[in-house]
Image (cartoon, rainbow, N blue to C red):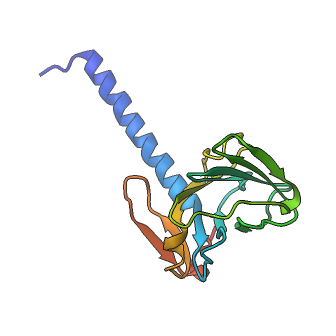
Amino acid sequence: MDIPRRHSRLAVRGAALLALSFVVTSCSAQNARVGVLAQDAPRDALPTAMITWCGDHAPAHLGLTGDVYEMLYTPESEPEGNLLEVDLADPGPGWTVEVELRNGETWTVEDGRGYIPDPMTHYQYRLGVSTDQAEDAAEADLGSTTFTINRLSREEGVYESLPDDDPGYEVTPIEGFALEC
């Protein structure tokens, strides 16, 4: 049986796209991890973000989105090493945080000092990490995780949500979180 030429080209293109998607997915999964520290997480403060990566592309920003606000965290210099810990409630000197409430109110927190909103314990948050300077807290090309403050307060270790197609999560001991490059 002779397959029409048009269908065979489509099949080849489809196979190539499928192979490329596996490469992109596996590189992403193997070259970076994004989590939040759940150990002794206070219920009235944002947690500490933990990001580990391999390669030359260090995080350029962290975006935290929730039901009430979005925050874009930007370091003043490129992080050293391959493990970054950032207290999302008080990132400290060397960080600028742009806060935008859903009602349109905005402000900037320079050097990690200033008012960062208290979290709502039952709201879901998404922490996304990008290697590019971004204008939107929702951008994330390095990785992301989704969490609630309530769930973090019941765990110990580094909390990571599983890929979008799996609603579950895993908690890794802190000492086993960093990637070995």
- Number of numbered labels in the structure image: 0
Q: Is residue 177 above or below residue 77?
A: below
In the displayed orientation, state which residue is furthest to the left: 1
Residue 73: x %, y % from top left: 74, 54
Quadrant the C terminus occupies: bottom right
Quadrant the N terminus occupies: top left
Residue 161: x %, y % from top left: 48, 63
In the displayed orientation, state which residue is furthest to the front: 103
What residue is shown at x 38% (from left), y 28% (from top)? Answer: 13
What residue is shown at x 69% (from left), y 52% (from top)? Answer: 71
Horizontally, is 26 left or right of 112 in the view?
left
Residue 114: x %, y % from top left: 84, 60
Quadrant hosting residue 120: bottom right
Q: Can you see residue 8? A: yes
Q: Can you see residue 130? A: no
What residue is shown at x 83% (from left), y 61% (from top)? Answer: 112
Horizontally, is 107 left or right of 167 in the view?
right
Q: Is residue 39 above or below residue 114?
A: below
In this view of the protein, which residue sits in the foreground, 153 or 101?
101
What residue is shown at x 64% (from left), y 70% (from top)? Answer: 47
Quadrant hosting residue 7: top left
In this view of the protein, which residue sits in the foreground, 159 or 109?
109
Q: Is residue 138 above or below residue 49?
A: above
Residue 176: x %, y % from top left: 57, 79
Q: Is residue 20 above or below residue 171?
A: above
In this view of the protein, which residue sits in the foreground, 45 or 49?
45
